[in-house]
């Protein structure tokens, strides 16, 4: 089956955080999310495009059941920015396999060198999704979200640097991240050897 990109707009993590919290407390609505998105974006088309992406990441997420089952436990976890960011990226990746593939390539190359060129990522992801404008737009949509989450940094234009691993304070955030890996790879459990996959490089 042909892989699709399906994401062409960056969503600020603070907006996703608000969307997730409203989902968990039962107040989520398209009108409310559009109101939040309008603080970052202009134009009806862009707002509609962004709303579709947020809906796919939060209420329509394929791993949303793990959040539904841990609503009370999530409340204090989401107050810690590091854990919040891990959870949001897990939701992004499980909603959009393209995003998962991009992050996994970062992990693969960061496992052998601390600094990588943007063209390296573009070349490898294009081999899967095609060398076209949609692939480029997809990369430009998800990479800023990884940067905002602190998974790595961009010391200069076209270069990305991995400095240190993220230390989560909650097992729940990692559990949700692991769930995204399992969902994408269509597996029910996570054998120990798979924890060395490049997707998990970013954590202690």
Image: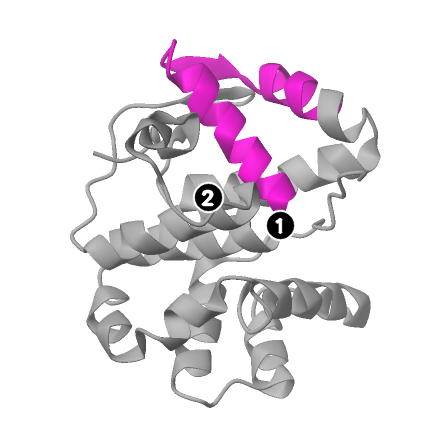
**Residue at 32% from the left image edge and 32% from the top image edge:** 195
Location of the N terminus by quadrant is: top right
- Name the image quarter holding residue 110: top left
Residue 155 position in % (x across, y down): 41, 23
As drawn, 29 above or below 203: below
Residue 182 position in % (x across, y down): 46, 46
The residue that label 2 is drawn on is 181
State left or right for residue 93 relative to residue 34. left
What is the crowding at mark 1: few (fewer than 14 residues within 10 Å), some, or many (at least 20)? many
**In the image, which residues are magenta?**
97-126
> Nearer the N terminus, badge 2 or badge 1?
1
Q: Which mark is residue 96?
A: 1
**Residue at 39% from the left image edge and 70% from the top image edge:** 67
**Residue at 43% from the left image edge and 57% from the top image edge:** 88
Residue 176 position in % (x across, y down): 36, 55
Q: Is residue 100 magenta?
A: yes
Q: Is residue 96 magenta?
A: no
Assign a secondary structure to mark 2: helix
Residue found farthest to the top: 112
Tell me the distance, in whole angstroms, between the alpha carbons under discs 2 and 1.
Answer: 12 Å
Location of the C terminus by quadrant is: top left
**Residue at 70% from the left image edge and 67% from the top image edge:** 52
Q: Is residue 22 visible?
A: yes
């Amino acid at each position: 089956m042909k892989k699709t990109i399906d994401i062409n707009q960056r969503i600020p993590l603070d907006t996703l955080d608000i969307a997730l919290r409203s989902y968990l407390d039962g107040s989520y609505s398209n009108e409310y999310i559009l109101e939040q998105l309008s603080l970052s974006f202009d134009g009806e088309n862009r707002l509609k495009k962004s709303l579709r992406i947020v809906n796919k990441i939060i209420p329509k997420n394929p791993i949303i059941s793990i959040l539904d089952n841990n609503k009370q436990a999530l409340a204090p976890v989401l107050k810690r920015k590091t854990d919040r960011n891990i959870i949001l990226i897990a939701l992004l990746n499980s909603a959009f396999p393209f995003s998962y593939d991009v992050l996994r390539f970062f992990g693969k190359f960061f496992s052998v060198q601390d600094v990588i060129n943007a063209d390296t990522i573009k070349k490898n992801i294009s081999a899967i999704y095609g060398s076209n404008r949609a692939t480029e737009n997809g990369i430009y949509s998800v990479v800023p979200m990884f940067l905002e989450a602190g998974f790595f940094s961009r010391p200069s234009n076209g270069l990305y640097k991995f400095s240190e691993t993220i230390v989560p304070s909650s097992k729940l955030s990692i559990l949700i991240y692991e769930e995204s890996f399992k969902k994408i790879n269509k597996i029910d459990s996570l054998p120990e050897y798979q924890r060395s996959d490049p997707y998990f490089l970013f954590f202690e």
